[in-house]
Image (spheres, rainbow, N blue to C red):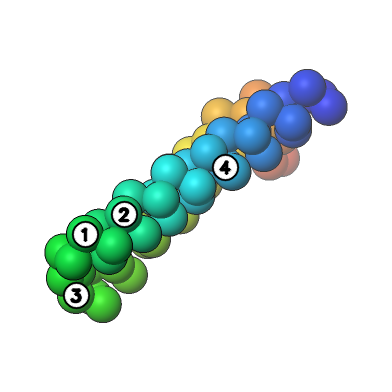
């Protein structure tokens, strides 16, 4: 259980770091990214992170099912 928590947290940090790095590099290169597009990118990142957590903890959470 501890191993799956650590791996999930590492994946979350990697996803956030990769997206932040891409947005930062685009900003440094002078590529204008509109604010609504940045918000959509972070929303997609949130959904990916939720899928990571679902995959890591989905089998251990029964949610009332037997």
Q: Where on the picture, by quarter, is residue 41?
A: bottom left
Q: Nearer the viewer, mark 3 or mark 4?
A: 3
User: Which mark identifies residue 25?
Assistant: 2
In this figure, which residue is indicated by the disc labeled 3? 34
Instruction: Give neighbour class at mark 1: few <14, some 14-19, many 20+ (Cα, 10 Å).
Output: few
SS for tag 1? loop
SS state under label 2: helix
What's the CA distance linking mark 1 and mark 4? 26 Å
Mark 2 touches mark 1? (CB < 8 Å) = yes
Q: Position of residue 57 (x, y in %)?
A: 67, 32
- Label 4 neighbourhood size at 10 Å, few (<14), some (14-19), many (20+)? some
Indicate the quadrant containing the C terminus: top left, top right, bottom left or bottom right. Answer: top right
Q: Residue at x 56, y 29 (%)?
A: 55
Question: In whole angstroms, how far apart are the C-alphas of marks 3 and 4?
Answer: 24 Å
The answer to whether 9 is drawn above or below residue 30 in the figure is above
Residue under the point 32% across and 70% down: 39
Q: Is residue 4 visible?
A: yes
**Looking at the rendered structure, which numbered label has been put on residue 29?**
1
| Residue with the most extreme left position | 31
Q: Circle 4 is placed at which residue position?
A: 12
Please tell me whether residue 6 is drawn above or below residue 63 in the rendered image.
above
Q: Check whether the beta carbons of the residues at disc 3 and disc 4 lie within 8 A of each other.
A: no
Q: Name the mark nearer the viewer: 3 or 1.
A: 1
Marks 1, 4: nearer the viewer: 1
């Amino acid at each position: 259980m501890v191993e799956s928590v650590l791996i999930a947290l590492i994946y979350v940090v990697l996803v956030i770091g990769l997206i932040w790095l891409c947005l930062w590099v685009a900003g440094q290169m002078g590529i204008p990214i509109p604010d609504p597009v940045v918000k959509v990118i972070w929303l997609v990142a949130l959904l990916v992170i939720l899928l990571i957590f679902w995959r890591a903890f989905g089998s251990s959470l029964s949610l009332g099912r037997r």
